[in-house]
Structures are given as C-alpha cells and as structure tokens.
Amino acid sequence: MQADEILLDCEERMDKAVQVLKSSLAGIRTGRASPGLVDQLRVEVYGSPTPIKQLASVGVPEPTQIVIKPYDPGTLKDIEKAIIASDLGFNPQNDGRLIRINVPPLSAEQRRKLVARVKELAEEAKVAIRNIRRDANKAADQAEKNKELSEDDRDRLKEEIQDLTKQHENEVNQIAKAREADILEE
C-alpha cells in the first residue's frame, strides 16, 4: 500500500468517526426543541424498523414544541408508540392528523447527566480515532517491511498520521464543548 493510500484511508475513517459523533450528539437534547431529538428514532411499520424521517415531516414551530406530520395517516399510532417506547421521556399528543411533543425545560441534574453523556460520546470518538491511527501505523510498518516505503518515508507518514489524529481529536473536543455549552445554557 502506498503512503498516499494509507493517509487517505486514515483521513476518511477519522472523518467518519467525527460524523458519527455529530449525529449522536444531534439526538441529545438541550433546553430547546429540535428535529434532531427524534431523527434517530426508528418506527416499527410495514414489518420493519423505519427512520422517522422517511415516515413524516418533523418541524419545530416554537422553541418548546416538535410537530410530526406523517405522510401516511395510518402510521400515526406507530409513530406515537415509538416515541413513548423511546427513552426520550416525551409525552406525545396525537390529534388524529399530527403529533405534538412539548419539550419540557431541563433540570440542573438532567443537564449534568447530558453533559456527562456528551463527554462519554466524545471519548468514544477519540478512542475510534486512535484505533484508526494504530491501524494506519501498522499499515505503514507493513509497507516498509514489504519494501514499498523507505524507513524515512515511513517515519514521515507516521508523523502525518499523528498530525491527522491531533487535528481530528481537536475537532471532537470543539464539537463536544459547543454541545456542552448548548446544554448548560438556560
């Protein structure tokens, strides 16, 4: 494997780890309503779990309310059931055409728990990035063993991999800090 291929693969995988973190954090609520709170929700319809985004339009008409309008009115009860069964702690109100979810304000204890969860998710992302670094370093060592890279090229490649690792870890830290600030903001 060439140095460029190793570096490109490493960067793509690290970018994916950061994207996974972003999508995980979108589901963590702050004091405001957001469609991201229910985006990860899967609804059991037509015999398979389906993302809510494929079944309904999700809107936020005001800061403390989420409105879900199903494309097919027959899925209304299934969507309501999925919201109740989820661990989001919301109490959906069904008026026969759409579902309204009032998002209550967070208590200080709930905010602390959510901040701890954000830190946990950020740490998982950093571990994933470090594992990717380890894999890329192994690939660099293997390429040097196979005489595809010189020793100097391998060392240079490892330095670039380390730079990528630092860059992605810093990005994870910034994303986590921003999300913590959102949660703690009253």
Image (cartoon, rainbow, N blue to C red):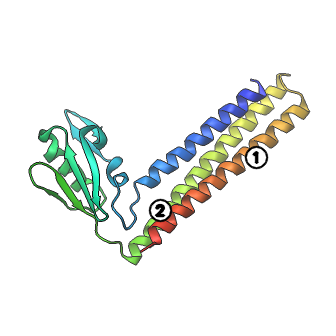
Tell me the quarter of the picture where residue 100 sits. Answer: bottom left
Tell me the quarter of the picture where residue 143 sits. Answer: top right
In the image, what residue type sits under mark 1? Asp
In the image, what residue type sits under mark 2? Arg
Residue 146's place in the image compared with 174, above or below, is above
Could you say whether the residue bearing mark 2 is in a helix, strand or loop? helix
- Decide if residue 14 is on the left or right side of residue 73: right
Residue 131's place in the image compared with 6, above or below, is below
- Is 150 in front, or is 51? 51
x and y, in percent, of residue 31 in the image: 37, 68
- Is 25 in front, or is 131? 25
Tell me the quarter of the picture where residue 108 sits. Answer: bottom left
Could you say whether the residue bearing mark 1 is in a helix, strand or loop? helix
Q: Quadrant of the C terminus?
A: bottom left
**Residue at left 70%, top 41%?**
134
Question: How far separated are the C-alphas under marks 1 and 2?
Answer: 27 Å
Label 2: which residue?
Answer: 117
Which circle marks residue 163 in the picture? 1
